[in-house]
Image (cartoon, rainbow, N blue to C red):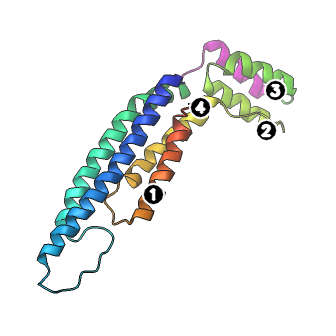
Amino acid sequence: MLSDYENKRINKELKALVDEYQRSYEAAHLQSEARYKTTLPAGASFYPRKGFYNAEDRQRFAAKCQGYKDKAHSLIDKAAKEIMDQNTAAPSADAANVVAVVNARQNMSVEEIDQLMTRYGHDCPMVYRALYDKAYSLGYKDFIRHPIERVAENMDSLLKKIDRAFSADDRDTTDMVIHASAFNGYVDDAFPAGEE
């Protein structure tokens, strides 16, 4: 697991990045609009619209978006590797033997599984998952998933949202706020900042 300091740092930097992206989009949109207005004939009516007014402005902003995506990935990649390494760490020989014995058993008490999860699964999410699955197959459904597994899933979800969050698609301010809020929610799930 990441330290509280690392979670807060990455959380803050990702949220600052999405704020910067929003400001950059608004500025690029206004510049595109201003350039478009200069092309109108004298006395022509202007009707504002969302997005960019020409393909060049859209392409220019798409290049900026790629920079935002790259920066977001660089902020997350090291932490994601650390979490994924922890989530997929191989069990010790003792833990692997315990899992094999447990899987051969037809009946176990919830207390036995709990003790084994605490002893062997705490430091090895793979062992914890095997014991969790055994408990579930025996009808014991009150166990929670390993914290590293939940963090890994949240991290994976956040990584998938980066492309959508930092997009050059035509958006209005409402879309921008919705996407930023959704992205910030994924950031909070993957990198909980705790109470300030």
* Mark sitting earlier along the chain (1/4): 1
* Label number found at residue 137: 2
Marks 1 and 4 in Cβ contact (< 8 Å): no
Element type at marker 2?
Answer: helix
Q: Nearer the viewer, mark 1 or mark 2?
A: 1
Determine the residue located farthest toward the front in the rendered image.
43
- In this rendered view, identify the residue nearer to me: 21 or 136: 21
Q: Amino acid at mark 3?
A: Arg
Element type at marker 3?
Answer: loop
The Cα atoms of the two marked residues, 1 and 2, are separated by: 44 Å
* Label number found at residue 49: none
Q: Amino acid at mark 4?
A: Glu
Marks 3 and 1 in Cβ contact (< 8 Å): no
* Mark sitting earlier along the chain (2/3): 3
Eyeballing the image, is 15 above or below 176? above
Marks 2 and 3 in Cβ contact (< 8 Å): no
Q: Which residues are magenta?
A: 88-104
The Cα atoms of the two marked residues, 3 and 1, are separated by: 53 Å
**Residue 28 % position (x, y):** 24, 59
Residue at mark 4: 195
User: Can residue 108 be spotted in the picture?
Assistant: no
Marks 1 and 2 in Cβ contact (< 8 Å): no
User: Residue at 49% across / 46% down in the picture?
Assistant: 184
Residue at mark 1: 177
Element type at marker 4?
Answer: loop
User: Residue at 73% across / 19% down in the picture?
Assistant: 118
* Mark sitting earlier along the chain (4/3): 3
Q: Amino acid at mark 1?
A: Val
Q: Nearer the viewer, mark 4 or mark 2?
A: 4
**Residue 125 % position (x, y):** 62, 26
* Label number found at residue 105: 3
